[in-house]
Image: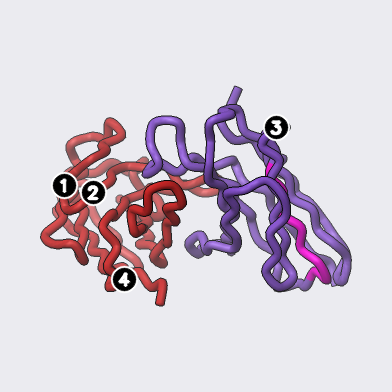
Chain colours: A red, B purple
Amino acid sequence: DTEVTQTPKHLVMGMTNKKSLKCEQHMGHRAMYWYKQKAKKPPELMFVYSYEKLSINESVPSRFSPECPNSSLLNLHLHALQPEDSALYLCASSALAVSTDTQYFGPGTRLTVL
Amino acid sequence: QKEVEQNSGPLSVPEGAIASLNCTYSDRGSQSFFWYRQYSGKSPELIMSIYSNGDKEDGRFTAQLNKASQYVSLLIRDSQPSDSATYLCAKQGIQGAQKLVFGQGTRLTINP
């Protein structure tokens, strides 16, 4: 089973709203990722959690705040977003294998900021 | 030079033919390579991973890796209209195994 789940599937929010995206995996993976994908572009890495600790932050604006409550869950808290933040937000997970680590993606959350 | 380069296409192939997707990369130290398929509006789905020089086959899909030439390819035999999608080539980044570096993707259309 290589399933990563994400909620909600779609989210529309105003620039003053606070919302959260959720991601869950039950594969025993020890790394979880947030990516942002704009139309006709490849996914761009935002954050990586390894063993529940933030290991990579790709200079993402502070209006995006990640959280990893446990090894199966990953949240992305959103506050004071801009219209240009509208995109598909993808969660992924991997087992953290030494040299052959493979990332599996969830279905994504389509975010629209008005 | 981009770390991973793909021809963005579109690549148009008749149904039943072989579709050939190509990818080059700039870092000779890269170890792991992946092909993801992405349908419009959906998330990337892993098709193949390859780590050693040579060919790796899985059903209608064959991945080929040539580390000396820094070249990865994906062949799709007996192409079906359902194979129409964007194909993303990715490798483990220079800065660490956790960072996937993607190419721009090749849009493939299979014509019935």
Left or right of A79? Residue B45 is right
Q: Are there few (<14), some (14-19), or many (20+) residues within 10 Å of tag 2?
A: many
Residue contact at pointers 1 and 2, CB within 8 angstroms: yes
Left or right of A108? Residue B8 is right
Tell me the element at label 2.
strand
The Cα atoms of the two marked residues, 3 and 2, are separated by 33 Å
Name the residue at the bottom extreme.
A1
User: From which residue to which does the magenta span run?
Assistant: B72-79
Tell me the element at label 1.
strand
The type of residue carrying mark 3 is Ala
Q: Nearer the viewer, mark 4 or mark 3?
A: 3
Check the residue under mark 2 and report the chain it is in: A
Give the residue displayed 66% in from the left and 37% down from the top.
B67
Residue under pointer 1: A53
The Cα atoms of the two marked residues, 1 and 2, are separated by 5 Å
Q: Quadrant of residue B96?
A: top left
The type of residue carrying mark 4 is Met
Residue under pointer 4: A27
Image coordinates for residue A16, horizontal then vertical, percent: 15, 47
Residue under pointer 2: A49
**Is residue B81 visible to us here?**
yes
Which numbered disc, 4 or 1, marks the residue that appears first in the sequence?
A: 4
Tell me the element at label 3.
loop
Left or right of A44? Residue A26 is left
The Cα atoms of the two marked residues, 4 and 1, are separated by 18 Å
> Across the whole image, how many numbered discs are drawn on residues?
4
Left or right of A31? Residue A71 is left
The type of residue carrying mark 1 is Lys
Residue contact at pointers 4 and 3, CB within 8 angstroms: no
Labels 3 and 1 in the same subunit? no
- Whether residue B17 appears in magenta in the rendering, the answer is no
